[in-house]
Amino acid sequence: MPEGTLCNKNPIETDETLKTLLSDTGGKQYYKEMKSLDVDSRLLWETIEKTCKSRIRTWLKICAHCGMCADSCFFYRINNRDPRQVPAYKIQSTLGEIIRRKGKVDNEFMWMAMETAWAKCTCCNRCGLYCPHGIDTGIMFGYLRGLLYQQGFVPWELKIGAGMHRVYHAQMDVTDEDFVETFTWMAEEYEEDYPGLTVPVDKVGADIMYTVNAREVKHYPEDLAEAAILFHLAGENWTIPSKGWEQTSLAMFAGDWGACKIQVDSVYDAMERLKPKRMVGTECGHAHRATVVEGPYWAGRKDGRPPAESIHYVEWLAEALRTGKLKIDPSKRIKEPVTLQDSCNYVRNHGLKEITREIISYIVEPGYFIDMAPNREHNYCCGGGGGFNGIGLYRTQRNKALITKRDQILNTGAKLVLAPCHNCWDAIRDLEEEYKIGIRWSFLKPLLINMVEVPEHLKAKK
Amino acid sequence: MYDFLTGPGLWLSIGICIIGLFVRGVIYIKGLNWQLDRVAYTAHPKAGIKGAARSIFFWILPFGTRSWRTQPFMTLLFFVFHTGAIGIPLFLTAHNMMLMENFGFSFASMNQVAADILSWGVIISAVFLATRRLVLPEVRILTTAYDYLILFLSVAPFITGLLCRYELGNYSFWLIVHILSGEILLVSIPFTKLSHILLFFLSRAQLGMDFGIKRGGMKGKGMTW
C-alpha cells in the first residue's frame, strides 16, 4: 500500500484530518499503515541534492571514525556502552547510508532510521562539543528528521503536533480565543490578592511582549497567572498578543519545516504588529530555540534575528532581580539542598549558562545550591528532549534514557530540582514517577511568587 | 626514476595537492548556505570571526578543550601523530634541501634528534591508533578498510623515511619508495579524507561561526565549541 489514510506523506492541514488522526488512540492504525508505506526514493534523493550541501556532506565524509563522540552521548553511556549508540555510527548508518544509496532505501530501513532519529538522539548537540572536526551530529539528525517527515515516517504524536501548528498555530488545539480568555481569567482569579493585576492584550509599543507554551494554557494556567503577577510586581509595561502567542514548535521536533515557518511567522507577525521593545518567552527550552535561535532562518530573516530583541524568561528574571524590579524576601530564600537542570536548548545552544546561576544567587541561601556534574554547556539532556518525552512508541527507551539525569540528581543529594524548561520539567517529573527517588521539581515562577516582596503600593488592602 | 621523482614528480604532486585542496576549499565555502545551514554567516562578521578563531585555536591546543582533557591518551596520540606528520615533511633538513633545489626556497630545518623523535612518534602513535581501531568496540564499529588505508598512506613515508635514515637494506631502493610514497600521499590528500588538512579548519570555523553567531556566542562567555 503506497499511502495510508492516516499514515502518509501529506502534512495535516485541516482540523478534520487532525481530529481523525487524534482519534486513532496510540497511533495503532497509523503505525499499521506505516508498515506498508512506500518510500519515494526519487523525492528523497531530489530533496537531498537540493538541501544537503557542503556542511553536512563534509561532516559525513571527513568523519575520522575516531569514536571520540561515543562518551559524550548519554544514550551510549546508559545502554551499556553499546557501540550501536555511538553518535557517528548512528548518523553514518542512517543519513550516511541514505546518501550512499542515493535514496534507494526500503520501508524497513526507514523504520530503523525513524527509531534512530527519535529514540536514539534527542538533538541535544552535546556530541558536537566533543568532535575534533566540529561535526555536530545533532544537527544532522535534525536534518534527517526532515527527510523522514517528508516520507511519512514520523512518530504519530509528532505528526499530530506538527499538524496542530499548521491548523491552530499552537502545539495543542488551543485557539486564540482560548488563550486570551484563559490568561485574563487567570489574572482575574488573583486580582483580589494583587489589586490592579490585569493582562494587557495587544498593547502597541509595550516594553515586553510575552509568549507562552500552549500547554500552559491548556494544562497549567497557574503558570500564566504567575507570569502576570511577576510582571505586575516588577512594574513592567507588558502585553500579550491575541495572535502569535505560541512560542513552541513541535514541528521542529517532527522535522516539518513548513509548519516551523508557519508557526514562527505567526509570532513575528505579532512583533511587527505590536512593535514591542522586547519579546520575553516562557520557561521553555525548545520554544526559545525554535522562536529565537532557529526561527529567523525558517522565516527567511537574513540577519538571523527575530524582528524584536527576544529573550528567555531566565534572562528577564535575572535582570528584574539584578535591577531591583523584583526583590526577594531574604527569609523566604530556599534553604534546602537544591540543584539546577541546564536546558540544552538555551544553555548549550544559546549560551545562557551563567544567567540561571545568577538567579540562584538571589533566591537560594548561600551554601544550599549543588551543581550537577557535568553542568552548564556540558550538562546531559534531561532524557526526554527533542520530542522524546511525547512519543508512546519509544516510551521504554525514553524511560531508560532518564537514568542519566536520575543519577546526576541523586549524586547532588538535592531534593529540589529547578527546571526552567518544559521538556526538562516533564522528564524530571517522569523520572520521579518511574524511579521514585524522592525529589521535587519546579519552574522558577511558582518559587518566585512565594518569595518576592510585594511593593507597598501594590499590596491588597485588608 | 630518482630524477623524475625529485623533479617533475615533485612539482606535479605538490601542484595537485595544493590546487586540489584549493578547489575543495572553494567548493566547501560555496556550498555553505545561510538559510539551509541556519547560520547568518555574513550578517555578524565580528562574532563569526571570533567564534571561528576560538573554535580552531582551542582544538589545536593540546588539552585545550574538554573533549581533549577527558580522553588524555587519545589526545596524546593525536598530537604526537600530527606534530610529526606536519613537522617532518616541512622541516626535515633533507626535505628543505630538495625544496631549495626545486623551488628556490626552504623552511627552517630541525636538528636530527628532534627529527628522529618526531618520526618515531608518528609511527608509534599510528600503531596505537590502529590498535585502538581493533580493540575498542566504539571505534571498531565505525572503522572501515578505508580508514586503515588512510593511516597506511600517511605512515608509509615515515616508515620508508626511517629505513633511509638508518640506511637499512638497499638505501637507493628505499629512498625511491620513500619519495614515491610521499608523492602518493600528496596526490591523495585532496581526493580522500586526508583533505581534512584543510577541511578541519573550515569545518571547525563553520561550527565556531554557528555557535559564535547564532548559538550563544554573543550571550555566553568562555564557551568553547
Image (tube, rainbow, N blue to C red):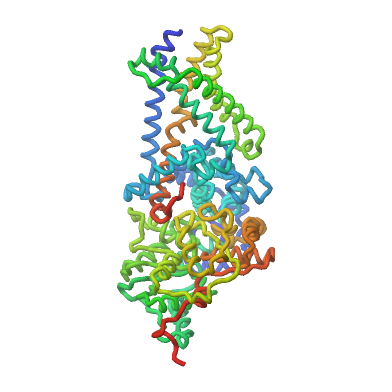
Res A385 quadrant in image: bottom right
Residue B98 seen in the figure:
yes
- Direction bottom: furthest residue: A462
Taking the spot 47% from the left edge, 77% from the top edge, the residue there is A452
Q: Left or right: where does residue A274 sit relative to residue A291?
A: left
Res A301 quadrant in image: bottom left
Seen from the viewer's position, the closer of residues A70 and A215 is A70
Q: How many marks?
A: 0
Seen from the viewer's position, the closer of residues A117 and A308 is A308
Where A323 sits versus A116, above or below? below
Residue A24 seen in the figure:
no
Name the spot of residue B64 as percent of width and height, x first: 49, 41
Name the spot of residue A112 as percent of width and height, x first: 61, 48
Where A77 sits versus A54, above or below? below
Name the spot of residue A23 as percent of width and height, x first: 59, 69
Taking the spot 50% from the left edge, 30% from the top edge, the residue there is B82
Where B79 sits versus B214, above or below? above
Name the spot of residue A187 as percent of width and height, x first: 45, 82
Q: Left or right: where does residue A3 sit relative to residue B91?
A: right
